[in-house]
Image (spheres, helix red, strand yellow):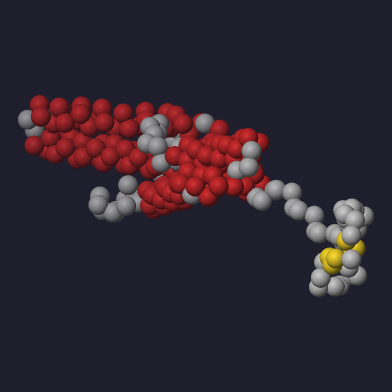
Amino acid sequence: MALGQSPAAESPVAAAVTDLRTTAKWTIAAFAGVGVLLLGGTPVAAVSKINDMGDAAAVFAGLALGLLGVGWAVWQTSEAITPRITLLSQLDAPGAAALRAAIARDPAAFYGPFPPSPDQLRSARVLHQTAAANLAAAAAREDDERKRSILEQARADAQANAALAERVEGRLLELIHATQVHAAVRRARLHTAAAAITIAVGAVLVLTATSDNKPEKPPPGPAKTGTVTLPILPDGLKRSPPNSVKSFKAA
């Protein structure tokens, strides 16, 4: 918490972490909606358009790829909202390189009057806390009012320095935590892009398998002409001329 800031107010770093996690939650909700659509709508729409086992296998593969992409995106994005333990030693991690560079440019903005090192900052805090405890004990044993007043003032100064060191440590922990969450969200973006491609490939497989791929009937051609064989008539009957209403007549 910064100097002069009320305990109830949220620091800018904490607000940034909240925004990053909100973005991750919206990403998870969007991909979860895609998963519901794949499981709920696609099988119902595709079941009447599957013609053979090849189409069924393609639909299964497409759904499997789509759900794999959804699960992949949700899994990677959930890393950004998973509670994590942050330590000052994690400032030396590879993911905190940008934060280390910012500290190197202006150490006093991050460490204040303390040495620009997590270990030295911790040692300074312990030193001031120990000094405050020793001065308080010495003031309690002192009978002289003037000396006791001096010891009390020194104890108050040591306590103030220890409290300042604690605030500096807390601010560094917030920055390290924000850096970790930002890195997790950034990695999640890359994974969600790859997952979206996987879902698209699965959707193409499903659409290809459920399209109307039956062979079309050839257009009707000209009627084939052939020789018509007439039956042999018995004696006494003769054929009527063509286009005659009467079929046969007696001789």
Q: Is residue 88 left or right of residue 188?
A: left
Q: Position of residue 118 (x, y in %)?
A: 43, 32
The residue that appears at 26% across and 27% down in the rendered structure is 130
Query: Which quarter of the image is occupied by the C terminus?
Result: bottom right
Q: Is residue 66 left or right of residue 20?
A: right
Please say whether residue 109 is visible from this viewpoint: no
The residue that appears at 37% across and 36% down in the rendered structure is 83
Q: Position of residue 185 (x, y in %)?
A: 50, 44
Q: Residue furthest left?
A: 143
Q: Is residue 124 left or right of residue 44?
A: left
Q: Is residue 97 left or right of residue 125?
A: right
Question: Where, by quadrant of the figure, is residue 186 drawn?
Answer: top right
Compared with residue 234, is residue 50 higher up or lower down, i.e. above or below? above
Compared with residue 172, is residue 19 higher up or lower down, i.e. above or below? below
Foreground of the two, 248 or 178: 248
The residue that appears at 44% across and 29% down in the rendered structure is 89
Q: Position of residue 144 (x, y in %)?
A: 8, 33
Q: Position of residue 45 (x, y in %)?
A: 53, 50
Foreground of the two, 152 or 218: 218
Please say whether residue 41 is visible from this viewpoint: yes
Say how many tags the image has: 0
The residue that appears at 21% across and 40% down in the rendered structure is 156
Q: Residue furthest right?
A: 227
Foreground of the two, 215 or 222: 222
